[in-house]
Image (tube, rainbow, N blue to C red):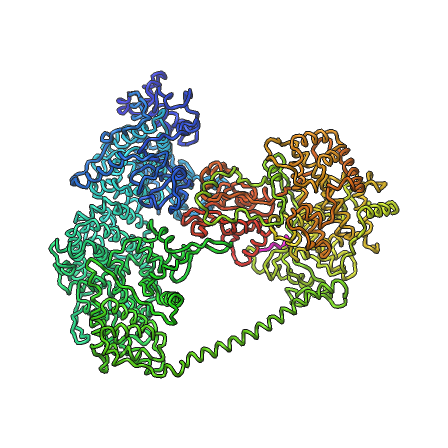
Amino acid sequence: MSGLSSFFPAKLLGSMHSNPRERQTDPLSRLRFTLETMPGSRKYNFTPATRAEILAELYDAFWGPYAHLFLPNSNSSLPLHATLSEVQANVGQFKEPQIVPGRPCGHIFKKGESCFRCKDCALDDSCVLCSRCFDATDHTDHNVSFFIAQQSGGCCDCGDVEAWRHPIDCPYHPYSPENAEYITSFETKTLLNTPRAHVKTLTGQDIPPVKNYPFRVHVPSELRESISRTIGYAIDFVLDTLDSSPDETFLATPPSEAALRLQPTGDPLMHDQFAIIVWNDDKHSFDEVIELLHDITNRSREEASQIADRIDEQGRDIIEMSGHSARLLDMARAIAQIDLGVTVRRAFDTFREQVSAVIIEWLLDLTRSRLSTDALILREILTSELLSPRKNSSLLSAKDPSRVLPDISDPTRLDWLFLYHARLWKKPRLNLKEIYASLLTVSHEHKLAIASHFASVYHRIIDAYLLTDREAETSIKYFALQLFTVPSVSLYIVRHHNIVSRLLAVISAFFTNQISDKRIVFPPNPDAEIDVDTFPFKSKRFMPVFSDLRYLCHNEPVQELIAHNREFINQFAQTCQIFMCINPNKRAASSHVEYETDAWISVFNVTLSLSRVIKIYGEAFSKATVGELVAAIHTVMHHILKCITVVDDRRDLARFPPVAFHEVVYGETTYKIIDFDVMDGSISFHHSLQWLLAELFKHVDILDGVSLRSAGYGSLRDVCLRHVNEEALLTVIDYPLRVLAMIAQIRTGLWVRNGFAIRGQLLHYRDFMLRELCYDQDLFILQTALVVLDPNTIMVSMLDRFQLLGYFSGATLHPSYDTSHLSGMVEEFLYVLITILTETASASKMPLPVAVRREIVHALAVGPCSFTDLVKRVAERMVDDVCFERVLREVATFKAPESTSDLGTYELKDEAFDEVNPFFYHYTRNKREEVEVVLRTRLKRKLGVQDPVIVPQKLNITNGPFVSLPSAFESEVLLQIFFYGIYNILTLTDATGAAPPSAEAILDQILHLVMVAIVERPEVFAGLAAHKIYEEGQNLVDVLCTFEYHEKYHPYRARVRWILDQVAHHQEVEVERRRRRPDSQSKTEDPNEAKKRAAKARQEAIMRQMKAQQAKVAFNFEDLDDEEEEDMSDAPEAPVSYGTCIVCQEELNSSKAFGSLGFVQPSRQLRKHPDGYQSYTNEAMTCVDTLDRSLAVSLETGFPPSASEIKSAKRVHSTNFDAFPPQFTRFGLHASICSHMMHLDCFTVYSASIRQRHRNQATRNHPESIPRKEYICPLCKSLGNVILPVVIATPPPELNSLAFTDWVRAAGISILKSKPDPMLESLQFRTGSGEFVFWTAQDSAYQSHLRVADRPDSTEVHKMVDTVMVVAKNISQQSRHLRERTEPEPGERGAGMYLPEELVGYTISALEIALRGQGLPGRTVADMITDPQYRMIRGLLTCLTKLVSLNFKFRADEGREAVRQAIIKRLLPEWSRTSFTSFAHPLLLRDPFAILVETAAVAPDMLKHILVLTYYAHLARTVIGLVYVLNKSRSSATPTLGARKYEDLFGDTRMFFMSVVRHSPIFEQAAEGVLLSFGESRIEQLLYAFTLPFLRRALILCRATYPNAFTTPPDLDDSLCEYRRLVKILGIPPLAELPTQDTIQNALSGWCAHYGHSHAASQLNCGVMLEYPSIYRLARLPLVLDHLYLDQDKMMTCARCKTVPLDAAICLFCGTTVCFQSHCCMDMDNGWRGECNMHTRECSGPIGLYFLVKRCSLLYLYANNGAFGQSPYLDVHGEVDVSMRRGRRQYLHRARWEEVHKIWLNHGIPTLIARRLEGTVDSGGWETL
């Protein structure tokens, strides 16, 4: 049937299949029919149902009757919308990995997955491991980096022999020696075989099925047939569709309507229904696209936003479909206007493209699926179909059937797919790349086949990539990375597909702008000229093309090819020749250049990319023979000379000025050298061929004398001069020399008029990272010249180029340099001279680890620094090398970061300082001087010499052509340079009486060179120095002797003495004759020394005087403190000062009201004990018994953590990172103060000024919000919103000292005597809880100070109370839903938050919680609270007192007595006649601490006694809470504890327990069960844990009220647990003494009975919530950051959009993962806020704290503002790695993590954000910072 179908048009097919049964017979024909007729039948509208139908048809045709072989257990068909691999994965078919030795892992990374790279194991940077293989292999102490896949498509290289330096022993992918052998033999075979003239393309038939695969399954031939036919047809369908797709998506002007109708199409009926499509690109933001779509398509923003998401995810989307083409074209124009990709096509074709996308998805699914257990067969069949030619499968394709590709014979389907890749869009492109990647791992033959097809169309791929592709990052060009880095594959395609030379041709043609019809011309015209201002140089995309070339040439077998085949170096030299001397510079002498272009930037980008290839190309010759290397040197020199000396009319004279020679007399000799003036000629920084030549000269081991002689050359000089004369050679080296001279002039400031461009070029050329590619090569060429030619000629050439011939002949005035320029040039010249005479790395071919060691030692000699700074000082090739970190560990010690702000630093070990050379050629002058100081001080210490001499080391070049380098020190030119260098400076100094500019540096350099000369050639040099006579009959020794005792140059004396002593060994007579012995040495000391001594004595006297003054001042301060305390007690006459007001700077005292700046914020920090979470109950049982000592647990671990720690820390996280469940938090108000104070009047003025600033800076995101009454403290920039009164009043009343029982009796009697107080009763809650309405935040009767006439001093306090009440009321109104208390309705008295409990109580609790786990021996928690905090608590209590007095204005005691009575009645029910009627609410349902706070506010004198009562109330409440919690938990799951530890505190717990609950039978029963199953020691432990916080808080409150009463007695036994200490200090009789305390027993039984009879007890719902007793922690982040990615799907999934966010943020309060700044989860109603803000509102109220995983930073949020904070993670080098740019593994740093806890526990987040915002003036909201 199928054979016929291609002859009939589709209409006939339909009628032939009219018999339904027959239609079923051949599923493939049915598939054909469906796909061909679908566009019309679906009215061109593509829906998810369409996709499902296509998939169903594809699978049916694919497996025919054999579905059961694919589908797991009895599934007869696939569920709709599902794909095969998903179904197979769900039943766990892929769970057990198939372990076959030698099979690679091939796991394909999805976007956002983590991959690992190990430098020590991998062959190059492209080899990566998936997290599973990385976990399974051992990389201890290796240099491991970790990163997140930005795109899908890369694959894990584990198990691939060619990816690793040595087997890495992965248990899942065992090593197979056969594979390794096979690859080696394949490589040797390919190297030996001559390349074929016409390469044979490998087709499907050439590839054998994979051998030795144990999981094979028998496949019926019928099934194999249907699989391959279906796959073949599917691929052809895609290709037929793409035939008519456009190459470019970018239309500058959309076509006219007529042209639109003539577009190529696959629609035989040419329907005029059109679709307009918008394409994704990387330069438009979401918002831009949404706005545009919203404007032109009349869609809502919601819909536009969904389309934009689809465009981003899929790569394109249809935005409109209609038959009205004119309208669509108008829309297209509007879209094209903002440079967005847009196409208008027939709807038929667009529909078919969508079908093709589904087919590609289906093919990808097949690569992931198995046939029963066989995981390879489907991929093998797919490959063989891809490697077959296209079949002419349908009549619908309008093109001619032969369909040829012009430059590829017999193209296969794969070739077509590669070419059409650019016509697809993002999603199918990535899918295809993933398909190809999965085929590469099938076998080596598969890899080769795909690579050879890729290579044959590579140039066309590059065309599309460089010229037309809009979305470069998904281009198939990047597939090269996976192929070109495989050694055997590269070798094959370089050998047989000639890819290197084709790449070089592409580069040549592209940069000479040979581009026509969107194609790069091939082969290029060799004579085309280069122009740096054309498009190619501006294109950013050429970099990866050079990278491809680099990857290819980097492979070892390819390096062999380059070394042994001459045509490689020939072609490469031709390509380099194009770039020779481009973009030359000419000095602007008289006026500044008018227009500074930045063309130089792109030129540098190109030549640096090229120079990296040059480096690798040159290195390849280490594998060459002498003959091959010499031939290569000749080739390169030939090309250089062809470039710079051949004169013809096409020569660009700016780039290659004509060569001219002149004669120069220097000393007594005449030299013939090149004539060129750097100040006047044009010079280019770029001479790539010289760089290549330098690389070739570096193979000194091959160019050794012995091996050269075997090839018939005497020496390297002989090699160079074999084909050219000396003059030609001088021309070659003159180009680098010109650049060096130009650089010297630029650095000296002679080129300032050329503007910034010239500085920029210089900085790049000499930059640490890049200098070894260019600048160092120039120096090396000069150094080679010293060996190849006569060193005298070279030095004279240098002097001539630097224009210093005159200076070094004694002329100190210069025709064109002024004095400062002249000395600058001398210094630069000497720098170059020192480098070429003493730098031996290239000359002796120093092994890389040694070179790296040398670089690191010199970089660290200046002083310790962080890893990043170190890397910036060293060339990138060295940093990238695998040995870098190993060497670093050898020479330096790592100092781990300790505090929160410091970074890890590396410090050079002492013994390494011996290797430091201060004249190292990478040092700047300043660095060199610093290093000299360091070395001198070290030598002083070691040798005990006052003025040590640093003697240079020998050069030590043992073999190779550079052995003769030291003989340059015998040169007379050099001697003359030394002589005049010193002589000129001495003459100038004597003439002017001062040292000339740069004299010190120049003398340092010359003396260093002289010392080197003495070390290297002592005898010859000494002879020359003593006999060669220059100016005024002096020789060098004369000058040195004068210099030795010159008074201006004292610091040089030791060095000159050393030199003269050395010369004297050989020329004793001459030296002795000239040396002056100063006679005055013994008698008088040096006047300088005397001066120094006098100065020192003066300084010491001044210091003594200062010390005395300081002591005096300090003494006075101590007095002040004592006086204050005395004043408090007895002498109130003098006003006490509290410091100064921070606004008006006047004294704060009782003459004028003032307050503390405070901040009241809503908080959900306090935690209740989570009910029903067993782990928290266990934690309470095992928690530490003392919270006021610091916990020295985990801080001992070093940083970075050891391998064993990392292993043990692996899997400890639940999905929410062990965070605290947010539903168990308690809402309240937290007050804090910043310790600064202000007059009330000043405060009013300051508030007005803030409002004014908000009006002036209207667009700024201000740090404070006026509606929330916020301000910023002008001094410390803390956030504030209230001003708290500071208590200056008389000290509090004496504590009542009656014994407890007597006091209770007295209190009771006074209650009985007192008359009823109806006014007070009306002010208590009607519910009978005993709370007071005037202490609530929304009390309707509260009036501000403006409405109340009052005494002036109390009005001031009233004003301050106002600030608190306004804020409290505001918060209270917005947070009713967060409070569980029963409250009166708003508008009644008593509505809102109850301040003693929810403001004062809450604040004290928060202070206590923040101090858990901190403290010092001998101090209690109350000693840890600071004075300002106590001042704040007193201020809050004053506010409460004031609120009472406002309600009892007309009583003398302002109502204190009445409230006191009410509190006593509440606590002592049995004494009051009315207690059970007026207090219907059981006391045990109230927080006893709140009652303690009320007491402190109105009746502090009875604090001690009330404390005892509230403590027992708290105990009883805890019992009720425990029964409730334990009743639900199983005792078996709790830890077993030993004997009881606290019997002396709690006595008979069982008895106490039962007596509390005996009034309620239900409760009693529950309690008995609990006691039985948990036993006393556990219960006692829980009682301890849950009541300890109460004691800590009580002590803080009491200490605040009576600073001197509740002190820690000095004789307190510090070894006692905290509970025992606190009970002693507070004077509370412990529970163990209860049987002897009748009064307490009575009170207790009253409370318990009341509770037992209330309805709360009857349902066992208790109404008592226990508090969380341990130290508060945030969510637990893993020790190693990348552990987050191990089970990313489980651990980090956003609950809103159900995906793993690309940018995840983890809420540190509750451990939830949310999407950070993403498009999917947004709050449209609330100003488009992101999910972090949304989650914050649900989780912790106003504040948020998130860890941003990918950005590696913290995010703090508070009320719609926010700030980013530093990550708690540091990498191995102790540095923060923002956004994982470096990709090193990161570890949690304890101190930083503790700091985050501290900020959170102290409620410091709002202030942190305010300070950050205060420091920046932004206009676009904080997110833009």
Q: Quadrant of residue 1560?
A: top right
**Viewer-proximal residue among 1265 and 53:** 1265
The percent coordinates of residue 638 (x first, y second) are 16, 57
Of residues 1687 and 1546, the one nearer the viewer is 1546
Q: From what the image shows, is residue 918 above or below residue 696?
A: below
Picture coordinates of residue 1245, whole percent (x, y)? 66, 63
Asked if residue 1384 lies left or right of residue 539, the reply is right
Residue 829 can be seen in this image: no
* View extreme (left): residue: 712
Vertical comparison of 106 with 32: above or below: below
Residue sticking out furthest to the front: 1082
- Residue 525, compared with residue 243, is above or below; it is below
Which portion, as a residue range, is magenta? 1263-1269
- Position of residue 195 in the picture relative to residue 304 (left or right): left
**1268 magenta-colored:** yes
Q: Main secondary structure of the magenta part?
A: loop
The residue closer to the viewer here, 1581 or 990, is 1581
Q: Pick the quarter of the image with the N terminus.
A: top left
Q: Position of residue 1294 (x, y in %)?
A: 78, 56
Indicate the quadrant where residue 274 lies. top left
Q: Tell me if I can see residue 883 in this picture.
A: yes
- Residue at image location 23% in from the left, 78% down from the top: 1070
Q: Is residue 626 magenta?
A: no
Total numbered labels: 0
On screen, residue 1125 versus residue 527, left or right, reads: right
Q: Position of residue 1649 (x, y in %)?
A: 78, 35
